[in-house]
Amino acid sequence: MTENITIFIADDDEDDKQLFIDSAREVNERIHFVTASDGQEALRLLKEEQNVRPDYIFLDLRMPRFSGKQCLEEIRKDKRLHDIPVFIYTTSTDERDSAELRQLGAVHFISKPADSGDVYYILSVVLETKWDLSYET
Amino acid sequence: MDTATPEDLLSEIDGLKLRLSEAQEALDAIKTGSVDAFAIRKDGKPEVFTLQSLDYAYRILIEKFSEGALNLTLDGLIIYNNGYFSKLIDTPNEKVTGSYIFDLISRDCREKFQEQFALALHGCSKTETILSVNNKEIPVYVSLTSLQPQLATVGMIVTDLSEKKQNEHLIINYRNHLQIQNKIFNLAEEIADIGSYQRNLETGELTYSDNLFRMLGCQPQEFVPSMEKYLGFVDPDDKDRLRQPVSEAPDKTAPFQLTYRIVTKDGKIKHFRNTERAIDERGRKMTIGTIQDVTSHVAHTETLRNKNIELENLNKSLDQFAAIASHDLQEPLRKIRTFTSLLKQRLKEAPPNGNTELLDKIKGSSERMSLLIRDVLHFSRVLHMEDMFVEIDLNQVLNNTLKDFDLLILEKNASVSIDNLPVIEAIPLQINQLFNNLFANALKFTKKGIPASLRVSSRILQPEETGNEFNSRFNLNRALCYSEIRFADNGIGFEQQFAEQIFSIFERLNNREQYSGTGIGLALCQKIVEHHQGAIRAEGRVNEGAVFYVLLPLTQAAQINQIKRKNITV
Amino acid sequence: MKLNIKNMVCLRCKMLVKEELSKLGLHYTSVDLGEAEVLEIPSTAQLDQLRVALLKSGLELMDDKKTVLIQKIKNVIVELIHYSEEPLVINLSGFLSNQLNCDYTYLSKVFSDVQGFTIERFFITNKIERVKELLIYGELNLTEIAYRMHYSSVAHLSTQFKKVTGFTPSHFKRLKEKRVPITENR
């Protein structure tokens, strides 16, 4: 894990965002993060051509203005962004949400764990996996 | 030879006597009818005369008559009666002849018959009477004719009325039966709230059942039924719908059915379901129809539909509420767990200083949790409240709100201008809440550095405005008069595209770091106005401000009597 | 038989479980936070009684289906890590989802609800256990172990190893070679 990678994360909860960043750094200390606090800001940052194209996109579901679902739909429609793996990182533990969002193109659906330690383990597995974008579950 | 001896003359007399007695006998025979023919020597040739060709035919006629025929003396003695008569009274012919006709008449009718007989002596008479023979009563119709001067007798023709009488009985029975049936039918119509009618297509004649009149608020048969008269009862909006099918019905073989509104004579609005069909009754072309009063049915359907919509909406909002609530309520709890585990971790690694930040976070989370629970309770209470609607002066409510926020108003250097607000029928506690929430928002989302300015005004909505582009989606009650209260501020505003989203529960346009709050305030406002049969909408402009329009009816009306402009489709 | 019990957070809970099991005449071989192992196979009546008793203290006896599912998840992971000669599969969620024919989010939820930690943690701690084993056997060097256990680099393996165990791999190896006496506390 020595390459420079960029992770984009959109989440309105600052605590969750910080925990995510801290845990991800434990997996790979050289990750560069781009963050957004609501759906509108997320799409704006992602769509700006001059910005770095992230290697991974993490989206919370319930965000102000535009939801994670709406962002996902926009990302999938965007020619420049649609082959970036998108992960939903949310408080929801509903497998119906999981199925729906993976249907819409999310590569993985992660329920935020209560135990902070678990964030590291989840990200370990996620970031070590070669995600195949032709997911047809 | 002229010389005839006395002996010659005597034998001639004998011969003549014989011939005379023969002739007499013949005549007698003819008289009594025992001779049918006689022969005469005329010019040496015998000639036969048959009495048949004279009155035999008539005698056979009378004998074989299917009516009774009698010949009576002027005293009423039967000197002749035909076969039919004897059969009718079931008495052999010989016994009948020679008895008095009056003896054969039933005692109750004798006097009348005697009168008629007396009349007949001078001409003729006809009467109904009853024969009473062998304990059998036979109703008959008799025709008496005097045969004078040709004969000193009275001819009597007797027609058996037994069958007719039987038929008459049947008819009376049928008529009674029919009367009862009609009574039952009328009663049934009344009970079932049905009226019926028939229309003769050739004569145009229209007949209404009694109950149809009653259904129209009139007395049975109060007026002469006609199409025009009927249309007079029909609601103007529905008249055209009725005219066309009615004129078509006779040509169609299928029955037509239509439901429409009518107004009765005494001003009641009813819904009639009209079914009509053309029938061909023995060559007479007519239409028959029923009209059923479905007013309560319609009202029930309407109520049911409304209740269903209410239920659906309730379920939808409950589902939404439950889904979102479970997410949002989980958040603080999850954080508590997360930070507790982090704290455990940190305490393992490092000395206990610098961990106050974590403890603060934990504290903050539990506080947010209790705020959320409080707000959620508030919210659910509005759904269940059975509070009374009373007349409240909105100006007073506004004053109370200003008092509640006086400190904050001072802090924000805010100026509030208020116009006169109306008096409305509402639940005081809820309206208080509504105003408080709107004020709280206006004072929270202020622009930095600029004194906040708030303006509250109101106006009465014109009836046609309840269906305009802004308000049509609220499906307001057209029968009520609405007041539109405007809350305008000069704060940070919002993009108009989010104008509806902000009323969803827990939906925020900013994250917690930027502005505090549970995201329940506007959702609560919406619930409150809906409970009052009103509505709320917002208009925003980024960095300029926002306007909240609150529509509240001046008075509340019971749901059932709503006159909503809807087409009833059955 | 193994019993999964939810909401066990402390020593008191363990004691409570031990007490209730004994009351029912069940002999336990171990009681941990989240599960208890009993010698007997309890009857339905015993399970019901146990469920009711535990509920009074806020503990939940997991029903059979979930217990079975969690057991399956664990079996698949253990099988994958400890007994497969192939390099580790690279998509854990997809793999589990397919193997158990179940949405991963659901598997995740059930697992963490009962166990109190995530599948991923279980996976990684097991991976590290395997690494420990391989270190002790001494047949493979660290680079080979890193490859076999699908770590992108030795550095990554070391970092994770340290995070999970508290030691670096080399430190651990040296510890093990010191022949620690058998009377160590488990």
Image (cartoon, grey):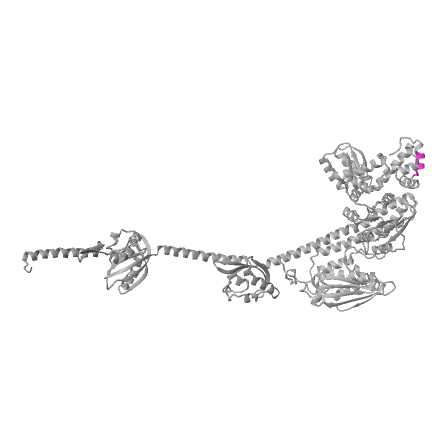
The answer, for residue C115, to whether it is visible in the render is no
Give the camera-side residue of C29 and A98.
Answer: A98
Would residue C169 be counted in the magenta stretch? yes
Q: Residue at x 89, y 46 (%)?
A: A24
Q: Residue at x 66, y 57 (%)?
A: B306
Q: Residue at x 77, y 69 (%)?
A: B419
Residue B266 at x, y percent in the picture:
56, 66
Q: To which quarter of the image does residue C93 belong?
A: top right
Residue B269 at x, y percent in the picture:
59, 63
**Secondary structure predominantly adopted by residues drawn in magenta:** helix
Give the camera-side residue of B128 and A74.
Answer: A74
Residues rendered magenta in the picture = C167-175
Give the camera-side residue of A36 and B346.
Answer: A36
Q: To which quarter of the image does residue B499 belong?
A: bottom right
The answer, for residue C86, to whether it is visible in the render is yes
Residue B488 at x, y percent in the picture:
79, 65
Would residue B153 be counted in the magenta stretch? no
The N terminus of chain B - image quarter: bottom left
**In the image, residue B26 above or below residue A95:** below
Q: How many marks?
A: 0
Is B55 displayed left or right of B431 in the figure?
left
**In the image, residue A9 above or below residue B533:** above
Is B46 displayed left or right of C181 in the figure?
left
Is B569 displayed left or right of C121 in the figure?
left
**In the image, residue A133 above or below residue B206:** above
Residue B402 at x, y percent in the picture:
79, 64
The C terminus of chain B - image quarter: bottom right
